[in-house]
Amino acid sequence: MDRVLIEGLSVETVIGVYDWERSIRQRLVLDLEMASDIRPAAAGDDLDKTLNYAAISERIGEFAEASDFGLVETFAERLAALLREEFAIPWLRMTLRKPGAVANATAVGVCIERGQR
């Protein structure tokens, strides 16, 4: 199976379990690999026959804007379910990072895989 990539996508959202985090927006950085057979799109040079990474990126931004979760795990799980449903993605791997969350670490986060390749 081929994979469509989105790497280093930054979004801002309300995320965190501490009181001070509940009143600010914080940056999350996402990397996605999404299974897709790109041959039909390539054969006809047809955007409608592949995963549209611009549309997916926009939807992730909308999701982040409306979200208010305590855990990055919850954000990742809900976003993965939404993307798989709305864009008919059979398998995805998402790495979600929260930069600056822990002193002396560049970022913390999770990496999840959902669906079948």
Image (spheres, helix red, strand yellow):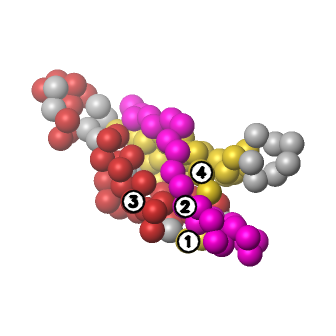
Looking at the rendering, the stretch of residues picked out in magenta corresponds to: 1-25
Q: Position of residue 53 (x, y in %)?
A: 34, 40
- Report the amino acid beneath label 3: Glu
Q: Callout 2: 10 Å neighbours few (<14), some, many (20+)?
A: many
Q: What kind of residue is marked 4?
A: Leu
Q: Earlier in the sequence, mark 4 or mark 2?
A: 2
Q: Which mark is residue 28?
A: 4
Residue bearing the label numbered 3: 62
Q: Is residue 41 above or below residue 16?
A: above
- Identify the residue under disc 1: 68
Question: What's the amino acid at mark 1?
Answer: Asp
Which residue is rendered at x = 45% and y = 68% of the image? 66
Q: Is residue 23 above or below residue 49?
A: below
Find the residue positioned furthest to the bottom.
19
CB contact under 8 Å: marks 1 and 2: yes
Give the SS element for disc 1.
strand
Disc nearer the start of the sequence (4/1) = 4
Where residue 39 appears, as percent x and y from the top left, is 25, 28
| Residue at x-position 76% and y-position 53% | 101
